[in-house]
Each structure stands twice: as structure tokens, then as C-alpha cells.
Amino acid sequence: MERADRLLALLRDRLDPVDAPGGPPRFGDGDLNGGLPLRETATTALRNAAVLAPLIVHDGPPRLLLTERAAHLAKHAGQVAFPGGSVDPTGETPAEAAVRELEEEVGIGAGHVELIGRFDGYETVTGFHVTPFVGVLKPGYVLRPDPGEVADVFEAPFDFLMDPANHLRHSREWQGHRRHFYAMPWEGRYIWGATAGMLMSLHDRLYG
């Protein structure tokens, strides 16, 4: 557990408090594209969303829990993602939204996660200001993925995701333009786009 203890100490030292006020997004899908926002609705206000990077440290090397989104979804179908979604505008906090989405998407309730902190906001091409949190999963949870949202759930090693050697830059055509993005392929899983961008943001916060 020494490796896990060091990692948890680093996270607690470098991340912002869970309830700290957030500023504008520091990172985003435009980072590798000349700083352009690349939003589909660039003239409208960003919508608030939150994700949770669930960290597993109790039964082996540290790793993060990730989902593969269902193929029928209108946005980001089939992509690898953190559990997360929109923040309810009627008074829900980003932290509450992240924990709620964790339970709705993969069946892990609030009693099985301890939020450690938040890191820098991220602006997505689809017009969201995403607040990312890191939470440690406690032993005893049972995965119950919602088939309406999640096709699969898997774990990826934290050390792999934080290794600069695995922080690749890929590109593809999107709406008539060449779009550049980060990618971290791992054992047949293509981790890219906003998820890879937020992992880069986490790396920057911890080791930058």
C-alpha cells in the first residue's frame, strides 16, 4: 500500500478542495487546434457538467475506472469516458452531479466513494464546461452498468495513463477540418478526446 499512500498524499496536496469555487475552463478540445474553442454552438453559453475519475487503490496497483459509452447515444457514442454528465441547474453542485452520475451509470453509490479533490475545468467541443473530480473507490462495491448509457466498464493502470510516453497526438477529419487531439490507446481501448485531455490536465496538476 506504500505506492497507494504516496499517490493519495500527492492527490490531496495538488488537487483543489472538492467544494472550491471553480473558474473558467483552463483546458479544452481546442488546445491542440490553435486555441480555437471548436464548439458546435460557439455563440451560446457553456453548459455545466461534471465527471468523476474513480481511483482504485485497495487491491493492487492504482488504476482508474473508465466506461465505454453505449453505441446508440446521440453524443460521443462508443467513446471511452469517465462517469459523468450534466449538472442539474436547479441547485445541484458539480460534486453532487459527479457522484450521482457514478451511481446512475455504473451502480456505485455515494457510500463507496470518497471524493479527494477537483482539478482544472475542461471545455468540450459539444459546449460543456466539465468539472473533473478524483474519488477513491472503497471496497465492497458491485458494478451495475446501465445498458442505456454504458456498454462496458474497465480499469486502466494509473501509471500508464500518467506516463508522458503514452500521451500521443492523433488527428482526424471533423466537420471539414483536421482536428487534433490527445490519445492514450491501451489494450484495445482507444482513450481519446475530452477524456484523454482531462487525463493530460490531471498529469499537469500532479507532475507538471
Image (cartoon, grey):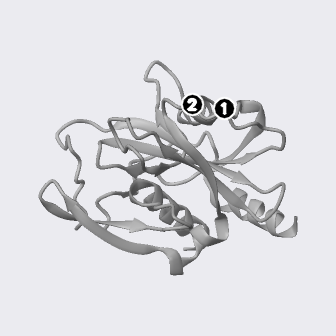
61 relative position to 183: left or right: right
The residue at the far top in this view is 90
Q: Earlier in the sequence, mark 2 or mark 1?
A: 1
Q: Residue at x 54, y 67 (%)?
A: 186
Q: Residues within 10 Å of mark 1 (few under 14, many from 20)?
A: some
Q: Secondary structure at mark 2?
A: loop
Q: Are marks 2 and 1 in contact (CB under 8 Å)?
A: yes
Q: Is residue 4 above or below residue 110?
A: below
Could you tell me residue 95's position as x and y percent?
59, 36
Looking at numbered disc 2 in the image, what kind of residue is underneath it? Asp
> Which of these two is toward me, 92 or 176?
176
- Quarter placement of the N terminus: bottom right
Could you tell me residue 123's position as x and y percent?
36, 50
Q: Which mark is residue 107?
A: 1
> Which of these two is toward me, 169 or 200?
169
The CA span between labels 2 and 1 is 8 Å
Q: Which residue is mark 2?
A: 146
> Which of these two is toward me, 42 or 161?
161
Q: Is residue 192 above or below residue 137?
A: below
Looking at numbered disc 1 in the image, what kind of residue is underneath it? Gly
Could you tell me residue 145's position as x and y percent?
61, 35
* Observer able to see residue 170: yes
Q: Residues within 10 Å of mark 2 (few under 14, many from 20)?
A: some
Q: Residue at x 84, y 57 (%)?
A: 59
Q: Secondary structure at mark 1?
A: loop
- Quarter placement of the C terminus: bottom right
